[in-house]
Amino acid sequence: MLLKELRLKNFRQFTGEQSVSFSTDSDKNVTVIMGENGSGKTTLAQAFTWCLYGDTDFEDKSVLCKAMVQAMPPNANETVRVELTLVHNGIEYTAIREQKYTKDGTGVLKRPGQTVFSIAYKAKDGQRVFVKDTETEFRMKEILPRELSRYFFFDGERIDKMSKEIRRGKSTEFAQAVRNLLGLSAFTSTLDHLKSKTGRMSVIKSYESSYDVSSNSKIAEYTAKINDYTDKIAKIDARLEEMENEELVAKDKCAELSKRIHDNVDSEKLAQERERLKRKLQGLIQQRASNGAAMIRKLNSTGPAYFSKKLMKDALQKLSEADKLDKGIPDIHARTIEHLIKRGHCICGAEIAIGNDAYKHLNEVLDFIPPQSIGSLIGQFIRDCELKSKSGESLFEDVSNDYGIVREFDNSYAEVEKDLKMVESRLQGMERVGELQKELQRYEGALRRLQTERDTLNMQKGSYTTSRDRCGTERNELTLKDDNNRKIEVYKAYAEYMYDTLSALYAEQEGATRDEQEKVVNEIFKQIYNGGFSLKIDEKYNIQVIVNDFEGYTDDVETSTAQSISIIFAFIAGVIKMARKSKNPDNEMLVSEPYPLVMDAPLSSFDKRRIKTVCESLPEVAEQVIIFIKDTDGEIAEEYMSSKVGARYLFSKKNEFETELTER
Amino acid sequence: MANKTITINGVEIDAEKADALLKRIIIKEKTNIKTKQYNDGEMVKMIKKLIEEVAECY
């Protein structure tokens, strides 16, 4: 697949119709598209994936140009279209994706409809023919499977995700896609046509269903049983493969959770400490409140007496000097006098009559006896003063103590609060180990269940295989007795022989191709990165990074961003180089196809020396290189690749919503 | 590739002819990948026809 032209209509900041023609010249195979930050480099790179697969990495999934949205009147329609013209297997294809946008009567943009995807190709007579709608997805998968596309449409700014993907958990589709790129697709189609694993009609299946059953009814019975066992085995195989991915995910999750638990092991202790401090703080608050209240209660009850001590002392002093005032008769009440006056004679027998001396004398006495007795009041006052003085005696000491405790609480409170803040700041950013532990247990449980399921399925598979083989042998004995069926057995034997031979050849070729690919990838990696690492590729095309200088150290190592990019470059450049290599006439059975490398901001993580090596090596390994690059990196890239650059474009940013593509 | 007669499931076949046939089929598959001339069903039919031609001659 080589890219010829990209045509855009109203795609994000590319207003109106704009196009880029990529260099397909084998000597000058590089197209450089340069622009300042925010001018649309990533958007243009994303236009490829939107066109081919209908998706972008942008959060805003609306791809209609914002300037166009503003200019659209109510009830108006506008279409976004991206067309990518490419050559694959010698046929010129145009992939077209369109999406219609409409504004409602109030001028609000409605939710857009589904995108419409079509593929047209140029027939031998030059006419443009559209691939049937039902076949577009299949055709696209064949031109460039989505699993592989992100490696060809390479985004330097999202390198972390890609780096993980390239090293772990490849799907069967990915491995298959790589094998096909390496030229093995003719092998896989032949194998599939001879004996399909997916239950599709194949040569062997077709022969098995054409036995002449009239000679012996048992033949049909065995055939039905064999088909049933085959279906069951295929289902088990599919589930086993699915489980492999589930296991990989669970294992990754367990490793990640274990690491997180290890990193956060202190958090549990800290969380307990935080709870303890919180409780202590709450206790202190309550204690302070109760002590404060007690102090106030004491002040309220005995404070007045305490603070009036001096006044009472002075008053008592004065009263002691005023003995003369006390003319009262002890224990005689005004009611006694009133009684005597009323009865008319005194205790002593003297007559009491209004106005006589006794009457006057008794009335004078009334001023000095209760309830009006000053002397009695003074006596009472003195007694009260004595009592109050006593009650206020301990006030100073009591309040001092209470206040001391309150002050101490304040200090302890501040201290506990400080500790609590410290614990909380340490806990910030830490995860709760308990929760992580629960999650880990869940995944470990899932892994155990998967293992049990795998064992059960393998046992079932073994039993079905034995039964199927037995039915096959028994059917074979019957079919060989009959001439018609014997003929079918002969044809089938040819098909079986070819299938087995090709399976062995494929495994051999695939292994050799993978070894060769590992060699090529390492050569390219060394050329680009030149560090103390080498790469290993397993049967699923996962890449493992090995440290060369430490013999015996076989674990995968974590890599820096520059190393990760180098690995991805090396891997994909290796695949591209191998795909070209299978063009060799010696490899007449292998399918060959050149592939482009479309890279967005590929050099941003490299130093100058590596930019030079990358710029020099990529045009050599890939048949076509398309680079979207910021102006500063672009100048360096052009300097190193000047002899290879066949087309140059510039992003001219008109405003935040509009960019124009101009040829330089 | 081998030049011998071998027995599969109780029937004899010419391995040399089978190997040559396999190569022919792979090249036909390779061509079809490029041209898309035949669909899967047609390819299965074509392979069967080729096998039967070779087996009849044996």
Image (cartoon, coloured by chain):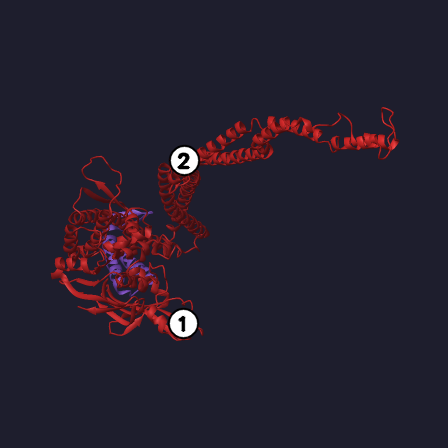
Name above or below for residue A152 compared with residue B6: below
Of labels 1 and 2, earlier in sequence is 1
> Residue A102's mark?
1
Q: Mark 2 highlights which residue? A: A419
Q: Is residue A139 visible?
A: no
Q: CA distance from mark 1 to mark 2?
A: 60 Å
Front residue (pair B20, A339): A339
Residue A218 percent across, percent down from the top left: 45, 50
Mark 1: few, some, or many residues within 10 Å (few <14, many ≥20)?
many
Residue A547 percent across, percent down from the top left: 21, 40
Residue A448 percent across, percent down from the top left: 42, 38
**In the image, what residue occupies the spot 46% across and 31% down?**
A408
Q: Are marks 1 and 2 on the same chain?
A: yes
Name above or below for residue A492 compared with residue A297: below
Q: Secondary structure at mark 1?
A: strand
Number of marks in the image? Answer: 2
Subunit ID for the residue under disc 1: A
Assign the N terminus of chain A to one quadrant of the image. bottom left
